[in-house]
């Protein structure tokens, strides 16, 4: 990998309470969960659990008020299967008659499932006094994932994204968010598994994405379900900036086809093989422990047969102390699942049909999920796609978690990542229905039910839409429900549940019309309902308002002439006219193009409205541009009359401006698909989970304190027999310390009831206090040895340093006599102290307290080191001294030599340089002062010395001397 296509910059100024921040993602599956984090300096990393594994079992075991998670819970589930809960995700928002619940009861007969008397949802009866709902058990798991992430990151988690299957409907998504709320996950959001995997694929291949759409199909077979998604990658320009984008174009799924189905069929085969051997009269199916053991062996067998042709299945003491073993081949496994293999390709076919493309348009088929490792599954996919090979470039287990962590960082305000637009698709269409009552001339009335599609299948989200209800003057109701679900099979439809979503009752419509609708200068624009499908894929009704238009009071402004339009403006208006005419003429392609981009919609720059037409008596689309113009300068007839646009460039009087009046309409929403828990039930659940969390925390603290005490006892008992430690004990310690350690060990062994962590800590403190002098003696002696060697090295260095600076000639000496004497004195005192103290130390008994201590050695070396550093720093900044001035006698002699008759030979170069030019008049010579002469002489001497040194460096073969 040449580069990491992620730019994560922590903006610490945004958070004053914490120096750093972490976001996390949880790929929550039915059997496993994978956790990923992003924190400053750590982009997209998988969290390791306490067993240092990269994925954790989604299992919760509750026994005697304590909880176990992950592999510990699964291990306990073999012994106590009734108290260990697995595969809770599929039970969210399910009632007792749902086929998923009925199949769950057959697979796990030892669970006692009951119905919530208020919501009708399924629950687990744990014991006579305790009932847990699937969302509470999932909340425990999610809270555990948060603790793992925070422990791994060593920071608190700021926000979380949880992946969900693409087929989850509104009720299931809402229930999962409810569970995240119970778990206390901060800023929880959800993301489809297919979208997360596609994002992980795209961010590492952004340089391969271009302006033309490339279609990739992601096939994901998990533990309980199979999904397929067609994803388009392309470069798009948003707000003038070009970035890559992925769009979900179509999905297909099978909610009951997964790896667990193969496991349960293998378990059934093992049961038949055991019964055939007739080793016991007991029925294996009546024993929860035996069934749990067989299921565990079936899971192992499935994994082994994915890579081997056959393998031995073995279970010790299955029932009645009878062992069981049998030989199973891959061929047998394929025969057991013969009816499943034809279903493997159906999600892929449905995704292509949903995306309206063929397999020829798909570049690759990428495998995701553990179930795709089954050889027969890959064989069926190759046969269906006609490809020579399937894409295995993604980590089948970790891709969704990593992709969701990237999205979590992108949504967080604490990180800045390279933009990658994500446009998820609505799996199910959503309609709005209402009754239109028409009064005829004869006084009779007829009622017509009108339906309008609010979100089509695969409609990108997040996105806002508006439905306008015209000719409603009194309070009325409308209904939100799923649209055409014919693409679901009868089995899938029975699992899906109700099609109805919400009943909305409006109050105050008549009052709004009485206030503004009866005025002559006021025009009604209808009742507008603002919907938004958020990033979680959940539909929300944000606002309902009655809209009116009235003439502006500023008559002067209305009478002003409108300036003529330029050619560019006229051309722009012509393009707008064509765009809007295409939309209102029913062109599907144009309507799709007019749909707001998800990224723009989030910033509030675009909205797509749906307007109920009086002529058709059905709501039609109204774009965000119309709404913006409607607020500023609405012209309701402009876009419907071609002659107005055609004459837009002509000078004409400006039409009277209109003002928009909006009145909020009160509403009551009754959810029909999802019964939310009351605030009392929610608070009770939080209190129960908090109480369990406190028990867990107390248990962890107790175990840590107990382990610390036990480790200390065993360690010191072992040290008491080591030679160094044994010699360091005096007579009293040799008697008291082993005795105290034995008593503490016996005390821990004889404890019948669990005690508070503080009790263990107090006992540990007592032992440490007793053993501290003994342990300190040994530690000091061991620490002294390397310090003595270090001190000897420092002494040698100091001695050489003193000799070197004393050997400097007087004219080169940069240190004063006082500085040299201070160093020599400190050096001599340190050497004397070391020798005397070491002599005393060697004279004492081994069990006596030390005289030579590490801290004293460090103090002595520190003082000597500071003095040497001072002198070294002075040498770095010192300048060479100028030579002393010459005496008067010397100067006179120099003058005599200069004025004498003796001539000094001048080199040819110097002769040429001093010969005056014939064109230059020679200036009279001025005698220099004695000081100037001295300076000139000094400079000349230094230059000569430098030249000599340069010549020596070039010709000598001896290595240069090392300078201090």
Image: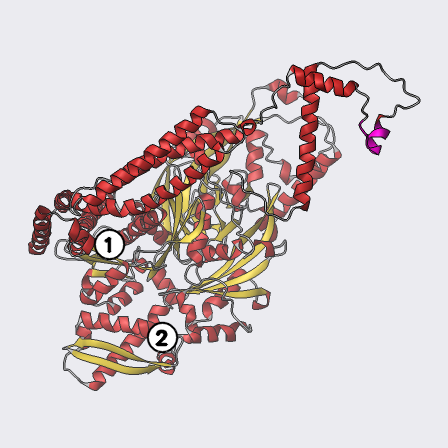
Which residue is more in the foreground, 550 or 38? 38
Mark 2 element type: helix
Mark 1 element type: loop
Question: Is 510 above or below relative to 282?
Answer: above
Which residue is more in the foreground, 296 or 593? 296
**Disc 1 vs disc 2: Cβ atoms closer than 8 Å?**
no
Q: Which residues are magenta?
A: 904-913
Q: Real-space Cα distance between discs 1 and 2? A: 35 Å
Residue that lies at the very extreme toward the front in this rendered image: 901
Residue beneath disc 1 = 133
| Mark 2 neighbour density, 10 Å: few (under 14) some (14–19) many (20 or more) | some
Which residue is more in the foreground, 469 or 390? 390
Which residue is more in the foreground, 508 or 296? 296
Say if the magenta span includes residue 909: yes
State the residue at coordinates (70%, 32%).
Answer: 944
Residue that lies at the very extreme toward the right in this rendered image: 918
| Count of numbered circles on the image | 2
User: Residue 711 location in percent, x, y?
Assistant: 19, 53
Q: Is residue 385 left or right of residue 666?
A: right
User: Residue 411 location in percent, x, y?
Assistant: 45, 44
* Residue 265 quadrant: bottom left
Task: Give the mark, 1 or 2, whose residue is nearer the N terminus.
Answer: 1
Residue beneath disc 2 = 304
| Mark 1 neighbour density, 10 Å: few (under 14) some (14–19) many (20 or more) | many
């Amino acid at each position: 990998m040449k580069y990491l296509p992620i730019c994560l910059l922590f903006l610490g100024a945004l958070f004053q309470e914490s120096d750093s921040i972490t976001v996390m993602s949880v790929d929550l599956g039915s059997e496993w969960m994978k956790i990923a984090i992003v924190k400053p300096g750590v982009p997209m990393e998988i969290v390791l659990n306490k067993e240092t594994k990269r994925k954790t079992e989604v299992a919760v075991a509750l026994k005697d008020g304590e909880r176990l998670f992950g592999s510990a819970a699964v291990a306990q589930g073999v012994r106590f299967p009734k108290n260990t809960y697995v595969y809770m995700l599929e039970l969210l928002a399910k009632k007792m008659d749902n086929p998923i619940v009925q199949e769950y009861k057959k697979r796990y007969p030892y669970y006692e499932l009951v119905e919530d008397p208020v919501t009708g949802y399924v629950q687990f009866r744990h014991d006579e006094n305790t009932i847990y709902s699937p969302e509470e058990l999932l909340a425990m798991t999610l809270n555990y994932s948060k603790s793992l992430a925070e422990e791994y990151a060593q920071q608190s988690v700021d926000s979380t994204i949880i992946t969900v299957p693409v087929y989850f409907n509104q009720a299931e998504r809402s229930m999962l968010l409810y569970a995240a709320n119970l778990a206390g996950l901060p800023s929880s959001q959800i993301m489809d598994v297919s979208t997360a995997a596609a994002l992980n694929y795209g961010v590492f291949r952004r340089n391969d994405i271009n302006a033309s759409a490339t279609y990739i199909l992601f096939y994901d077979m998990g533990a309980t379900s199979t999904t397929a998604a067609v994803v388009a990658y392309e470069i798009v320009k948003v707000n003038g900036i070009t970035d890559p984008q992925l769009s979900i174009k179509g999905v297909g799924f099978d909610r009951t086809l997964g790896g667990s189905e193969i496991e349960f069929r293998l378990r059934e085969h093992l049961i038949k093989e055991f019964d055939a051997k007739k080793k016991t009269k007991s029925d294996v199916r009546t024993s929860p422990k035996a069934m749990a053991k067989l299921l565990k062996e079936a899971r192992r067998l499935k994994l082994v047969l994915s890579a081997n042709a056959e393998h031995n299945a073995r279970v010790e003491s299955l029932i009645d102390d009878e062992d069981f073993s049998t030989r199973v081949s891959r061929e047998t496994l394929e025969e057991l699942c013969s009816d499943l293999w034809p279903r493997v390709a159906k999600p892929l076919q449905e995704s292509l049909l949903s995306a309206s493309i063929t397999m020829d348009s798909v570049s690759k088929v990428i495998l995701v999920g553990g179930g795709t490792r089954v050889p027969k599954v890959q064989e069926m996919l190759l046969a269906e796609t006609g490809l020579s090979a399937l894409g295995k470039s993604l980590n089948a287990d970790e891709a969704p978690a990593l992709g969701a962590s990237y999205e979590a960082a992108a949504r967080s305000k604490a990180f800045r990542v390279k933009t990658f637009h994500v446009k998820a698709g609505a799996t199910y269409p959503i309609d709005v229905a209402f009754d239109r009552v028409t009064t005829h001339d004869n006084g009779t009335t007829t009622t017509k039910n009108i339906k309008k599609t609010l979100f089509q299948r695969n409609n990108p989200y997040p996105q806002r839409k508006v439905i306008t209800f015209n000719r409603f003057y009194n309070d009325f109701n409308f209904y939100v429900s799923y649209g055409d679900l014919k693409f679901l099979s009868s089995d899938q439809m029975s699992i899906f549940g109700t099609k109805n979503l919400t009943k909305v009752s409006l109050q105050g419509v008549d009052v709004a019309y009485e206030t503004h609708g009866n005025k002559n200068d006021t025009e009604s624009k209808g009742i507008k309902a603002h919907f938004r499908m958020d990033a979680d894929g959940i539909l929300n009704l944000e606002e309902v308002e009655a809209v009116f238009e009235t003439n502006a009071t500023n008559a002067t402004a209305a009478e002003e002439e409108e300036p003529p339009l330029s050619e560019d403006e006229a051309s722009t208006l012509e393009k707008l006219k064509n765009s809007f005419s295409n939309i209102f003429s029913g062109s599907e392609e144009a309507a799709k193009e007019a749909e707001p981009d998800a990224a723009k919609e989030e910033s509030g720059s675009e909205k797509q409205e749906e307007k109920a037409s009086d002529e058709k008596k059905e709501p039609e689309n109204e774009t965000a541009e119309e709404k913006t113009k409607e607020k500023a300068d609405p012209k309701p007839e402009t876009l419907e009359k071609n002659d107005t646009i055609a004459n837009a460039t002509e000078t004409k009087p400006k039409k009277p401006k209109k003002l928009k009046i909006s009145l909020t309409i009160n509403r009551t929403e009754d959810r029909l698909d999802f019964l939310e828990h009351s605030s009392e039930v929610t608070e009770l659940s939080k209190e129960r989970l908090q109480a369990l969390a406190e028990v867990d925390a107390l248990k962890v603290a107790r175990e840590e304190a107990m382990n610390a005490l036990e480790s200390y006892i065993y360690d010191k008992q072992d040290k008491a027999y080591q030679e160094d430690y044994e010699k360091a004990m005096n007579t009293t310690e040799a008697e008291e310390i082993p005795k105290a350690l034995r008593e503490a060990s016996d005390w821990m062994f004889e404890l019948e009831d669990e005690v508070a962590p503080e009790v263990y800590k107090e006992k540990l403190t007592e032992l440490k206090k007793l053993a501290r002098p003994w342990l300190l003696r040994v530690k000091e002696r061991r620490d002294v040895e390397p310090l003595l060697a270090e001190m000897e090295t420092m002494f040698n260095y100091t001695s050489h340093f003193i000799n070197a600076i004393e050997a400097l000639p007087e004219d080169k000496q940069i240190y004063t006599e006082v500085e040299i004497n201070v160093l020599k004195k400190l050096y001599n005192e340190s050497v004397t102290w070391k020798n005397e103290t070491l002599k005393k130390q060697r004279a004492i008994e081994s069990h006596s307290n030390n005289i030579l201590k590490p801290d004293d050695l460090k103090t002595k070396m520190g003082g000597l080191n500071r003095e040497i550093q001072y002198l070294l720093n002075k040498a770095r900044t010192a300048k060479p001294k100028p030579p002393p001035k010459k005496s008067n006698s010397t100067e006179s002699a120099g003058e005599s030599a200069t004025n004498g008759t003796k001539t000094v030979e001048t080199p040819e170069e110097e002769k040429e340089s001093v010969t005056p030019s014939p064109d230059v008049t020679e200036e009279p010579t001025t005698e220099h002062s004695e000081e100037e002469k001295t300076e000139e002489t000094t400079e000349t001497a230094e230059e000569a010395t430098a030249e000599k040194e340069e010549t020596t460096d070039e010709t000598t073969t001896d290595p240069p001397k090392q300078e201090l």
